Image (spheres, rainbow, N blue to C red):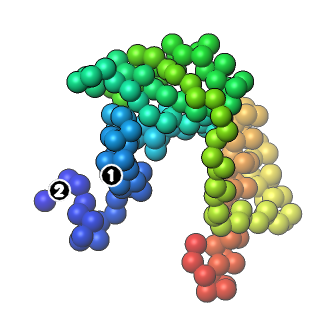
Amino acid sequence: MKGKPDARKGGSRALAGLLATVLEPGARARGFVRATLLTDWPRIVGPELAGRCLPLRVKFPRGRSRGGTLVIRAGGGTALELRHSSPQLIERINRYLGMPAIARLAFEVGPLPPRQQRRGPPPPPPPSPAALARVEQAVATVTPPSLAAALRDLGCEVLRHQKARARAEATGGHR
């Protein structure tokens, strides 16, 4: 049967989908229409703004799942900024949800919980000077200059990842 892969049979599933499934009951208890409002908050409001505010809960009129008030925690300056851009923010949230779930925003001024630092693999090492020279030579005749710059950046990234893969294979690690 084609369609969604069955995780029990070794199929892969997106982490965001699994996370939303796990968060759904708690999110509903806090009034959220969908847990994805929590998991995709940076995508909805942008990463810079998401680092300065956090959705806490949604209050809906009794018996309704539309026209609610989204309560957002933010610092004083951010809360003031968001208050001024509320119509645009509400529109973005509702467009993301695909329905007019949020009618207004309320703000709880206070500090955000500390963000956990992402720990990932170290960045790939820079390419060698000889490899950089080969990339420069390959794009020397490319026009327009903006395309040459993009190809140069791509070439450097490919070289960095090749170098990291070779290093991982030499040490028996996986990448």
* Res 91 seen here: no
Corner quadrant of residue 49: top right
* Residue at 64% from the left image edge and 50% from the top image edge: 115
Residue drawn where x is 24% and y is 70% of the image: 8
Query: What residue is shown at x 52% (from left), y 22% (from top)?
Result: 106
Q: Callout 2: few (<14), some (14-19), or many (20+) C-alpha neighbours within 10 Å?
A: few
How far apart in space, not on screen, are marks 1 and 2 (Cα)? 22 Å
Taking depth in this image into account, of 136 and 89 the one nearest to the observer is 89
Q: Secondary structure at mark 2?
A: loop
Across and down, in percent, residue 165 comes to 63, 73
Amino acid at pointer 1:
Thr
Q: State left or right for residue 9 relative to residue 52.
A: left
**Residue 114 horizontal/vertical position (percent):** 66, 49
Q: Is 27 in front, or is 41?
A: 27
Which residue is disc 1 drawn over? Answer: 21
Farthest left residue in view: 1
Mark carried by residue 110: none
Taking depth in this image into account, of 101 and 165 the one nearest to the observer is 101
Quarter of the figure that contains the C terminus: bottom right
Q: Amino acid at mark 2?
A: Lys
Task: Name the residue tied to disc 2.
Answer: 2
Element on which disc 1 rests: helix
Q: Position of residue 94 (x, y in %)?
A: 40, 23
The picture places residue 154, in percent across and down from the top left corner, at 67, 50
Image position of 150 with respect to 10: above or below: above
Tell me if residue 51 comes above or below residue 153 in the rendering.
above
Quarter location, residue 9: bottom left
Q: Residues within 10 Å of mark 1 (few under 14, many from 20)?
A: some
Left or right relative to 5: residue 23 = right
Identify the residue at horizontal 32%, vertical 51% (top origin).
Answer: 21
